[in-house]
Amino acid sequence: MDQTKIGGFISERRRANGWTQNQLAEMLGITNKAVSKWETGRSMPDLSLFPQLCNLLGITLNELFAGECIPEENLREKTDEVLLEVITNWLGHNQWDEAVPPAAENALEVCGVSKVYGSGDAPTQAVKNVSFQIPRGSFTGIMGASGCGKTTLLHLIATIDKPTGGTVRISGRDVTALSESEAARFRREHLGFVFQEYNLLDTLTIYENIALALTVKETPKDTIRKTVLDVSEKLGISSVLDQFPYEVSGGQRQRCACARALAADPDILLADEPTGALDSQAARQLLDTFSMLSREYGVTILMVTHDVLSASCCDRIFFMQDGEIRTSMSRNQENRQAFFAGILEKMAWMEEENRDVR
């Protein structure tokens, strides 16, 4: 694989779209220095960026690794084994010796986290001194209107962005102290992501999409197969493993994305508006799946949402407004209907408080 050729291809596609390195970096939520390193062949994009990068550049993953456009009739020529071997060879055998932290009671600890964009006379404080903890095996939601800072907070937790102040600890480890390369590896090995847009690779089958997360961790093939079959059965997608993402429903694609995130056994599953692109039935099925995973398998889930129905499935909700956590509430022994009503009451209270301040 020619890393310099790939970098040149990224540069060519970026220019064809009329973007500067800064503009592409902003769309991907990274620094322009990272884009510059890709385009000069000094580094490669992080695995978590592949789907978004390919989508922005209008290319397939196969074409990205080939460093050139491939005629449509030849796209299927590369088997999953060849494609995954390319990814594994690129990642290499990382000799970074990671100290294993002692088991922590909380899967996540956020302490005094803030994020300020810009400087000078008009800085924007997107997140303001946020602190909370999430116990292992819980299903927690962060709820708020668009622009309240909840997605920015999720990016800070996910090591996609760095806070201006404060610390984030995942399973006892301070992830705010990680370098860019350390953070990339931490995401691959300890975090699972479920996005509204699925971020699946259309040139891979459902099975291959799920297996991808395990292959980059150099998991043995027999273990990969067993894990993929097990997690697919839990999520009810065993019957579509041989199909491609564009051949299945939106709900099945989202459950595939969930299976891919779970296959690597992450410390925490991060979900950003996961029901946003689903119809009501598919959304309900996904939320029921999240509840089952937390209740029966001890999966720790943190979900960002603006939807009351989605929030009512959580064990606990943090309400965010203007970059701050205003209040929270726990479900305890309440049924879902009572919790739903309680969330509405809490939102009404927040709105009234906001009017009084104005």
Image (spheres, rainbow, N blue to C red):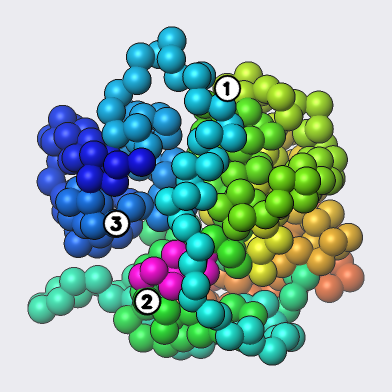
Q: Label 1 is placed on what type of residue?
A: Tyr
Q: Label 2 is placed on what type of residue?
A: Ser
Q: Label 3 is placed on what type of residue?
A: Ser
Q: Report if residue 305 is visible in the image.
A: no
Residue 270: percent from the left, percent from the top? Answer: 59, 60
Residue 355: percent from the left, percent from the top? Answer: 43, 69
Q: Report if residue 217 is visible in the image.
A: yes
Q: Is residue 295 magenta?
A: no
**Mark with earlier residue (2, 1):** 2
Indicate which disc residue 302 carries. Answer: none
Residue 255 as seen in the image, left or right of residue 170: right
Indicate which disc residue 43 carries. Answer: 3
Q: Is residue 182 magenta?
A: yes
**SS state under label 2:** loop
**Residue at numbered disc 1:** 246
- For marks 1 and 3, give the CA distance: 31 Å
**SS state under label 1:** helix
Q: Residues within 10 Å of mark 2 (few under 14, many from 20)?
A: few
- Residue sitting at 67 percent across and 77 percent down? 107
**Mark with earlier residue (2, 3):** 3
Q: Quadrant of the N terminus?
A: top left
- Residue sitting at 58 percent across and 85 percent down? 99
- Residue sitting at 66 percent across and 42 percent down? 210
Q: Quadrant of the C terminus?
A: bottom left
Q: Nearer the viewer, mark 2 or mark 1?
A: 2
Indicate which disc residue 179 carries. Answer: 2
The one of 259 and 167 positioned closer to us in this rendering: 259
Residue 344 as seen in the image, left or right of residue 1: right
Residue 182: percent from the left, percent from the top? Answer: 43, 73
Residue 175 as seen in the image, left or right of residue 117: right
Magenta region:
180-187
**Mark with earlier residue (1, 3):** 3
